[in-house]
Image (cartoon, grey):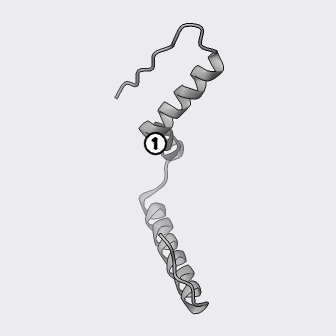
Amino acid sequence: MPLKMRLYDREHIGAALRRFKKLLERSGMTKELRKRKFYVKPCEERRRTELRKQSAIRKGKALAKNGLRACR
């Protein structure tokens, strides 16, 4: 998916760069690049997702114990 950005006359390079970075962020390309920066084995990915689930469960239980509820 090619991204297009138009440069305006007499626009500062800093402003154009800022607009370009926002465009990349909104398109999700920076997230994808960070994800692909290093190869993660499928078993490691499963392990990480399982750890995230367990952490969320523990956090929810701790909040419930204190009389608070988790906000989403």
> Dot 1, crowdedness within 10 Å: few (<14), some or many (≥20)?
few
Residue 36 at x, y percent in the picture: 48, 43
Residue 16 at x, y percent in the picture: 57, 20
Q: Is residue 8 above or below residue 45?
A: above
- Three-letter amino acid code at disc 1? Glu
Q: Secondary structure at mark 1?
A: helix
Residue 8 at x, y percent in the picture: 51, 12
Left or right of 8? Residue 3 is: left
> Which residue was labeled with disc 1?
32
Q: Is residue 72 above or below residue 8?
A: below
Callout count: 1
Which residue does the image show at 45% across and 42% down from the upper left? 32
Which residue does the image show at 55% across and 31% down from the upper left? 21
Relative to the observer, which residue lies in front, 10 or 41? 10
Relative to the observer, which residue lies in front, 47 or 17? 17
Which residue does the image show at 54% across and 76% down from the upper left? 55
Which residue does the image show at 61% across and 22% down from the upper left? 15
Residue 24 at x, y percent in the picture: 48, 33
Q: Is residue 8 above or below residue 35?
A: above
Q: Is residue 63 above or below residue 52?
A: below
Instruction: Identify the residue at the far top of this view.
Output: 9
Relative to the observer, which residue lies in front, 34 or 18? 18
Classify the position of the N terminus by image quarter.
top left
Relative to the observer, which residue lies in front, 9 or 57? 9
